[in-house]
Amino acid sequence: MDEAEFWELVDAAREEAGGDPEEQADLLVERLVQLDPESVLDFARHFESRYDRAFRRDLWGAAWVLLDGADDDAFDRFRCWLIGQGREVFEGALHDPDALADLLGDFDEEIDGDGEELGYAADEAYERLTGLVTPDLGLPAPPPEPEGEPFDLEDDDALAERFPRLWDRFVGGEE
């Protein structure tokens, strides 16, 4: 499976699910079980490599603004959700996390920002196909700390300065 096929699967499932990440994960599993086990592992490798690429402090700050706070677990779920938004949103956010203000449509904290189930889709499909747990994917170990310079996620002024478009769109009107 190449990168284009990976994104096609992600996009098709998201569109059919109407943006609901849990439904998207279920649809993704149904599509993946129609493939051979090695293709499912390829999908898992694509997903994990993007998940690791998104382990960045600037994206954590963007998630913090969007979710009104994001601990370690919430940021993990956010990264899965971000991949589920498709290539344009994912790559755009990596290029400039503040661009999420322009890349995202409506954002509902109740369903958006949490794609935990997406992170398990390949594992579930592989287990259904083979009866086995997903083997080691042979990817480099993820970094122990997020990439980038640390900053205080609880400093509203710093967040507003670092992410002005996100802040204006998702926080500014709430005061």
Image: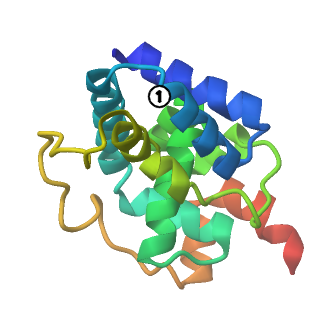
Residue found farthest to the bottom: 154
In terms of image quadrants, where is residue 136?
Answer: top left
Residue in the image at 54% along x and 75% along y = 70
Does residue 42 appear anywhere in the picture? yes
Residue in the image at 26% along x and 49% along y = 133
Residue in the image at 56% along x and 32% along y = 30
| Spot occupied by residue 33 in the image (x, y as percentages of width and height) | 46, 29
Describe residue 140's horizontal placement relative to residue 52 as left or right. left
In terms of image quadrants, where is residue 44?
Answer: top left
Describe residue 66's horizontal placement relative to residue 62 as left or right. right
Q: Which scheme is used to colour this image of the protein?
A: rainbow
Residue 148 vs residue 160, the one in the foreground: 148
Describe residue 110's horizontal placement relative to residue 27 as left or right. right
In terms of image quadrants, where is residue 89?
Answer: top right
Does residue 60 appear anywhere in the picture? no
Residue in the image at 54% along x and 26% along y = 31
128 lies above or below 21: above
Q: Count residues near mark 1 (Cα–Cα under 10 Å), then give few for <14, some for 14-19, many for 20+.
A: many
Describe residue 53's horizontal placement relative to residue 87 as left or right. left
Q: Which residue is mark 1?
A: 32
| Spot occupied by residue 119 in the image (x, y as percentages of width and height) | 44, 50
Identity of the amino acid at label 1?
A: Leu
| Spot occupied by residue 37 in the image (x, y as percentages of width and height) | 30, 26
Q: Quadrant of the C terminus?
A: bottom right
Residue 112 vs residue 125, the one in the foreground: 125
